[in-house]
Amino acid sequence: MKQYILALDQGTSSSRAVVFDSDFHIKGFAQQEFPQIYANDSWVEHDPEEIWKSQYYAALRAIRYAGIRPQEIASIGITNQRETTILWDRKTGKPIYNAIVWMCRRTSDYCTRLKEEGYTEIIRQKTGLIPDSYFSATKIMWLLDHIPGAREKAEKGDLMFGTVDSWLLYRLTGGAHKTDYTNAARTMLFNIHSGRFDDDLLELLHIPASLLPEVLPSNSIFGYTQPSLFDGCSLPIGGIAGDQHAALLGHGCLAPGMAKNTYGTGCFLLMNTGTTPIISQKGLLTTIAFNLDGTSYYALEGSIFNAGSTVQWLRDELKILDSSAQSEALAASVPDTDGVYIVPAFSGLGAPYWDMYARGLMIGITRNTNRAHITRAVLESIAFQVHAVLQAMQEDSGCILEALEVDGGACANNLLMQFQADILNKQIIRPKNPEATALGAAFLAGLSSGILNSPADIASHSEVEAIFIPKMQEDQRNKLLFYWNKAVSRAAHWAEPLS
């Protein structure tokens, strides 16, 4: 009997695979890291072949660890790092260049030009996004402009564009060129109102429509795996969603006003706003939360570029930590940061600041500053950034949250979660299942395979592991926020080109 779901969770620094049973309990898990390629200042790339291999091998190991056969898998769900851009040859299937990663800032000048030429509001109204190198469109432009022969091939229809979900689908099926609404909505080419790639934007950005994948609802059957991949089985791929959208589903945030935050390489806070999009006035993005059976549900989103990556910076570059897990104990060894603030604008600042030229800053250091203070300041910087986004989100939506659902690796850090509750003055709810992103992909695959009867069944599978209650006094909270905002003002616009 086919009673298992395989969720593929392709992230920025690793590929994960999770096998769930029909009650959505984890039966097998595997993870494989892959190299980050820092090609230049603020340039970040991945090898598309490494993405594929790491994800495929993780899937095979997860199936083996679950002690099941591929024949018992009812469906596969895919969730992925968003915006990361790959172009490959339609005839050979080979990428023409490395994947340009979502956090890569190489196209900042393209985006500045779009703003200066007055296209910000047109893009915002059509896509819910703003001109920023974060999104796929200007990455496609860069590839077409800088890879020899790329534009000519694209004009002839010989190239294919995909975000990572499309690339994995292509490799799994041996040729399907499709995506879902959530990933399409992150390209800065997709009209979130009409549900189509926008001809005006394609013309503006000189991107041939032949590059683009077919767009389907998130709980569609996108194709079937090549039999050679999974022991002769042709398994349905029954769900696709970008990682943050999948996590929103994984938390059961199906009602307007419900919100979650994922603590990964970056932080991503999404609030479900229902079937009506809200165009932000506070520096947030409007996006498609998910599309189920042809109906789009929308969300407000705030994207924070550097969160867990800042802890990795302590470990890998400053050598303050031997492992990221040590950050909690070291930070807890001091009562506070002793006035130290860190603004981790390694690749600019995302929502609600949207400053491509901000750069990282550590301020308030004295002769007394030690590695514990710096570590605690790094953890607190994550919570401060989340506060800025949530404040903007509440103002845009008119919804005042009582609690925030959390997931991602850093949500296991109790010190960070308590400080997050304190600085937000809201409850933080951590689920029993830490794999909310993979769980959301599994829910989509469950809907398409009949394991779930309807989206209403999703909520019954959400279980709480811990609730963090705010304890900080208001005057202390206000003081900390005042100095955080002061530190951000010092980091702003640092790398702007000289006139």
Image: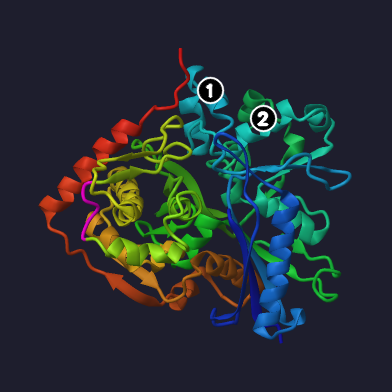
The residue pinned by badge 2 equals 141
Question: What is the image's colouring?
Answer: rainbow
* Nearer to us in this view, 250 or 273: 250
Q: Is residue 141 left or right of residue 252?
A: right
Residue farthest to the top? 499
Give the label on residue 452, or none: none
Q: Secondary structure at mark 2?
A: helix
**Disc 2 crowd, CA 10 A, few/some/many (<14, 14-19, 20+):** some
Q: Amino acid at mark 2?
A: Met
Query: In which image quadrant can residue 170 be found?
Result: bottom right
Vertical side of 426 occupied by 2: above or below: below
Residue 459 position by quadrant: bottom left
Q: Position of residue 324 (x, y in %)?
A: 45, 62
Structural crowding at the residue carrying mark 1, measured as other residues with C-alpha within 10 Å and reported as few (<14), some (14–19) or many (≥20): some
Residue 380 shown in magenta = no
Residue 249 seen in the figure: yes
Circles 2, 1 touching at the beta carbon (< 8 Å): no
**First to last magenta residue range:** 335-339
Element under disc 1: helix
Name the residue at 43% across, 75% down: 462
Do we see residue 425 in this rendering? no
Q: State the residue position of label 1.
A: 114
Q: Is residue 199 above or below residue 481?
A: above
Image location of residue 408, percent across then percent down: 46, 63
Q: Residue 478 appears at what percent x and percent y?
A: 16, 47
Which residue in the rendered view is the most extreme toward the right? 91
Q: Nearer the viewer, residue 431 or 36?
A: 36
